[in-house]
Image: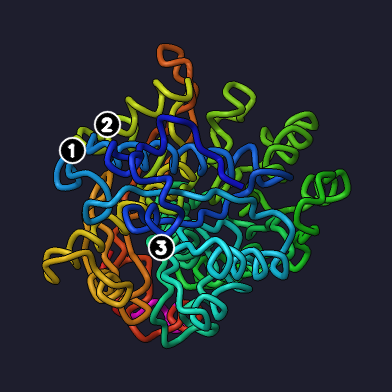
């Protein structure tokens, strides 16, 4: 599926003149990139579609040379991006087939995207097998480079994995809301890789930071995209714990907020939604105030006023194009394309010509590249796993802006919340997070 408007893909006049010569001539002047994101199903409205919008905007900016320095030249190493946006819905087996089709039939040169941890877990080895440059933009499971693909070549992830998300959440709670943890904590998380890993890492981090405090053995683990949470809300209402952890996202998070809010749960418990910012703009006033929300880095509501030229361009142009602020998924997808822009341009400069995939990979491995609000360091996973700052705060409705904002914000360095190179996240947390610089 090609989800593009006229403004998104701009072909040069020269290319248009020779287009009749066939696809081979056209491909010589473009970089064709497959972009998986949720276009249908529960993952689409609050995550997949904002991710798609972030792609449309950043591709337009790169192709037109609209971006501020250092990304103010046109294209990837001078060539225009042709993005083939396709649906990530359907599960891991389907996504393996989709990936093969995009590479073998549609001849894409790279894959940039993927939201679900399940998708990334299913496709990582396939990307290595068929030798396609893959930049994972969102999926949170730490297993990608710790277990599934410990010696990566073609696969990268340009943001923190879930260990940072949950360790930083624990740090924030201990620093700001320690009084809510006296009777322990409980949770509600989706029963698959992302939810399981998130609950485990948060529980271990809380125990490391507050020895003796334990997570509930009756934490809730409903099926992903279940949509109805009446029994789980009842169980949370009866629980003695005052703090509730949730890594819900997409339609599950929106449904839970609506159902739990109607029953007054947010007035009785303190919630930490580790990726809650994803739905805050969509829900507006319907999103509860006083929620601890995360974005898995410095994105969305946390950087709305950051003055960096690149961030202000993204904020201004996104609002102009889509009539709302960019949230976490839009930033994270766009960040993956900035990584590609950085690597293609760097590799071309070194080679003196348009680079090969191997040269692009070499340029991105272990790199530090600028993004919207700071740098991404490809510091872990043998230079294939990115690390960034992470930020936490509490939601509050801003009457002047007429949108949700965050207050009481704390920024955590990646060296505080991500494990050191060569150490698995879960082992690092269990070992007391040795070497953390907070």
* Residue 237, picture quadrant: top right
Is disc 2 placed on a helix, strand or loop? helix
Mark 3 and mark 2: Cα distance apart in space:
24 Å
Q: Residue at x 42, y 66 (%)?
A: 157
The answer to which of 28 and 295 lies nearer the viewer is 28
Task: Please give the range of residues in magenta.
Answer: 429-434
In this rendering, position of residue 28 left or right of residue 283: left
Residue contact at pointers 1 and 2, CB within 8 angstroms: yes
* Residue 59, picture quadrant: top left
Look at the picture and state if 258 lies above or below 148: above
Which quarter shows the C terminus? bottom left
* Residue 343, picture quadrant: bottom left
First reached walking from the N terminus: tag 1 or tag 3: 1
Picture disc at residue 68: 1
Residue 437: image location, x then y, percent: 26, 69
The reply to whether residue 246 is in sight is no
Label 2 environment density (alpha carbons within 10 Å; few <14, some 14–19, many ≥20): some
Residue topped by disc 2: 313
First reached walking from the N terminus: tag 3 or tag 2: 3
Q: Residue at x 56, y 40 (%)?
A: 3
Q: Which secondary structure type mostly characterizes the magenta part of the structure? A: loop
Is disc 3 placed on a helix, strand or loop? loop
Q: Which residue occupies the extreme right position in the image?
A: 231
The reply to whether residue 230 is in sight is yes
Q: Which residue occupies the extreme front position in the image?
A: 21
**Colour scheme employed for the rendering of this structure:** rainbow
């Amino acid at each position: 599926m090609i989800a593009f408007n006229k403004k998104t893909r701009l072909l040069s006049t020269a290319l248009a003149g020779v287009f009749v010569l066939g696809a081979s001539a056209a491909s010589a002047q473009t970089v064709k990139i497959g972009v998986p994101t949720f276009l249908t199903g529960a993952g689409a409205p609050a995550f997949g579609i904002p991710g798609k919008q972030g792609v449309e905007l950043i591709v337009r900016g790169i192709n037109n040379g609209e971006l501020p320095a250092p990304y103010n030249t046109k294209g990837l190493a001078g060539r225009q991006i042709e993005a083939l946006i396709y649906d990530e819905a359907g599960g891991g087996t389907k996504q393996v087939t989709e990936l093969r089709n995009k590479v073998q039939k549609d001849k894409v040169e790279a894959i940039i995207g993927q939201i679900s941890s399940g998708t990334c877990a299913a496709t990582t080895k396939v990307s290595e097998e068929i030798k396609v440059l893959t930049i994972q933009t969102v999926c949170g499971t730490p297993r990608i480079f710790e277990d599934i693909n410990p010696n990566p070549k073609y696969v990268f992830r340009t943001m923190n994995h879930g260990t940072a998300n949950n360790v930083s959440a624990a740090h924030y709670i201990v620093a700001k809301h320690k009084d809510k943890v006296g009777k322990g904590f409980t949770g509600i998380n989706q029963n698959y890789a992302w939810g399981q890993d998130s609950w485990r890492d948060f529980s271990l981090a809380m125990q490391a930071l507050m020895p003796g405090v334990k997570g509930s053995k009756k934490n809730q683990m409903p099926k992903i995209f279940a949509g109805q949470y009446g029994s789980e809300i009842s169980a949370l209402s009866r629980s003695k714990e005052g703090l509730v952890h949730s890594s819900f996202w997409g339609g599950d998070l929106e449904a839970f907020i609506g159902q739990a809010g109607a029953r007054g749960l947010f007035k009785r418990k303190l919630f930490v939604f580790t990726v809650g910012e994803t739905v805050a703009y969509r829900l507006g006033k319907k999103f509860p105030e006083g929620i601890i929300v995360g974005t898995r880095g410095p994105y969305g509501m946390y950087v709305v006023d950051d003055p960096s030229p690149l961030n202000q361009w993204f904020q201004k142009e996104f609002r102009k194009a889509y009539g709302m602020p960019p949230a976490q998924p839009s930033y994270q997808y766009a960040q993956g394309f900035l990584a590609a822009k950085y690597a293609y341009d760097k590799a071309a400069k070194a080679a003196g010509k348009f680079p090969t995939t191997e040269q692009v990979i070499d340029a991105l491995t272990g790199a530090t590249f600028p993004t919207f609000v700071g740098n991404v360091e490809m510091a872990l996973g043998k230079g294939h796993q990115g690390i960034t700052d992470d930020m936490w705060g509490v939601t509050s409705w801003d009457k002047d802006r007429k949108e949700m904002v965050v207050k009481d914000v704390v920024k955590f360095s990646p060296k505080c919340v991500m494990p050191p190179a060569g150490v698995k996240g879960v082992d690092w947390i269990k070992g007391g997070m040795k070497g953390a610089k907070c």
